[in-house]
């Protein structure tokens, strides 16, 4: 894909995400339209998840018919150029009226994240990252914090029922024991963006799906974060552990999380 073709995709998808954000926000503000159901224990679904994904799939198919699409709700097959969508990340927050949720869409070329857009409409925030072109929040450049000392770091450890509770609790315990302030906000995509803009110093999760991180990883990497080797194996289909942190905290966070990269940085 040429730089011009990538640029076209960046601008076109920024526009699509703005429309999708309005759609999601309309549902968020009219709670009786949410149609909440459960896909499993602690696994929430609303009408908005399906509506946002359907909207993005329909528009991408028209604009870029040769690109593949994978979405959290509708699945899909990987290809050389593939858009990976989470229509609502942080669905449990969304369903309960908490504003920490987002739409996440990332473009991977031959397994490498190239473009990432994360829009948090209820917070009025849009993060954009493009490989080699930096990362922005609402158009302003962002970069990771200068945290070097775990004893003054804020780290977020994501959680899902895919990980046994004792493993998660042990991770949190190691984080606190090392001196970190540990938190969990409920959106992996926003957790990565918060590292990108310095609101936290690390995000890690022992297993996370590709649609949660496809956009956030390129945003955080472009903001200067260390990113673990998430997409090195069959993570698009099966997910993987993820670690994202300031470069100086890599060693300490690798020890705490056990998520060790072969690459120092990418
Ligand atoms: C969830 C994320 C959460 C993460 C979970 C899960 P959903 O996605 O928001 O932060 O820890 O692994 O993937 O279900 O809200 O799209």
Image (tube, rainbow, N blue to C red):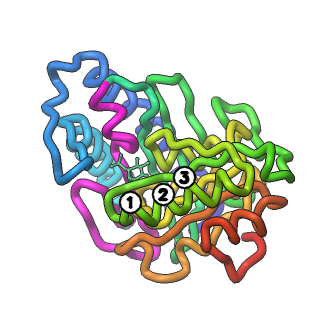
| 82 or 6: nearer the viewer | 82
| 14 or 93: nearer the viewer | 93
The image shows residue 60, relative to residue 16, as above or below, that is: below
- Are discs 2 and 3 less than 8 Å apart at CB? no
- Are discs 2 and 1 less than 8 Å apart at CB? yes
Residue designated by label 2: 169
Which of pointers 3 and 1 lies earlier in the amino acid sequence?
3
Query: The magenta stretch spans which residues?
Result: 67-96
In the rendered view of the protein, which quadrant contains the C terminus? bottom right
The image shows residue 122, relative to residue 76, as above or below, that is: above
The answer to whether residue 250 is left or right of residue 122 is: right
Give the residue displayed 51% in from the left and 66% down from the top.
108
Indicate which disc residue 157 carries: 3
SS assignment at label 3: strand
SS assignment at label 2: helix
The image shows residue 218, relative to residue 45, as above or below, that is: below
Residue designated by label 1: 165
**Within 8 Å: ligand 1 and the Cβ of disc 2?**
no
Mark in front: 2 vs 3 = 2
Q: Residues within 10 Å of mark 1 (few under 14, many from 20)?
A: few
- Separation of marks 3 and 1 at Cα, in angstroms: 13 Å
Mark in front: 3 vs 1 = 1
Which of pointers 2 and 3 lies earlier in the amino acid sequence?
3
- Separation of marks 2 and 3 at Cα, in angstroms: 10 Å
Quarter residue 70 falls in: bottom left
């Amino acid at each position: 894909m040429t730089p011009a073709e990538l640029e076209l995709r960046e601008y076109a998808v920024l526009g699509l995400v703005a429309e999708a954000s309005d759609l999601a926000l309309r549902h968020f503000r009219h709670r009786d339209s949410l149609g909440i159901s459960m896909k499993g224990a602690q696994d929430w679904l609303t009408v908005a998840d399906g509506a946002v994904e359907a909207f993005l799939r329909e528009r991408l198919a028209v604009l870029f018919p040769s690109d593949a699409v994978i979405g959290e709700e509708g699945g899909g097959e990987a290809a050389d150029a593939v858009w990976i969508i989470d229509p609502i990340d942080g669905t449990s927050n969304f369903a309960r009226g908490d504003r920490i949720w987002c739409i996440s869409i990332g473009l991977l070329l031959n397994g490498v994240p190239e473009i990432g857009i994360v829009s948090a409409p209820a917070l009025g925030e849009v993060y954009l990252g493009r490989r080699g072109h930096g990362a922005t929040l609402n158009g302003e450049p962002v970069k990771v914090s200068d945290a070097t000392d775990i004893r003054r770091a804020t780290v977020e450890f994501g959680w899902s029922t895919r990980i046994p509770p004792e493993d998660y609790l042990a991770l949190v315990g190691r984080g606190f024991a090392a001196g970190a302030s540990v938190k969990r906000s409920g959106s992996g995509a926003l957790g990565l963006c918060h590292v990108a803009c310095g609101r936290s110093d690390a995000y890690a999760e022992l297993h996370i799906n590709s649609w949660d991180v496809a956009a956030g990883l390129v945003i955080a990497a472009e903001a200067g974060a260390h990113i673990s080797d998430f997409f090195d194996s069959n993570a698009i289909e099966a997910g993987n552990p993820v670690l994202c942190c300031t470069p100086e905290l890599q060693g300490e966070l690798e020890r705490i999380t056990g998520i060790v990269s072969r690459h120092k940085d990418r």
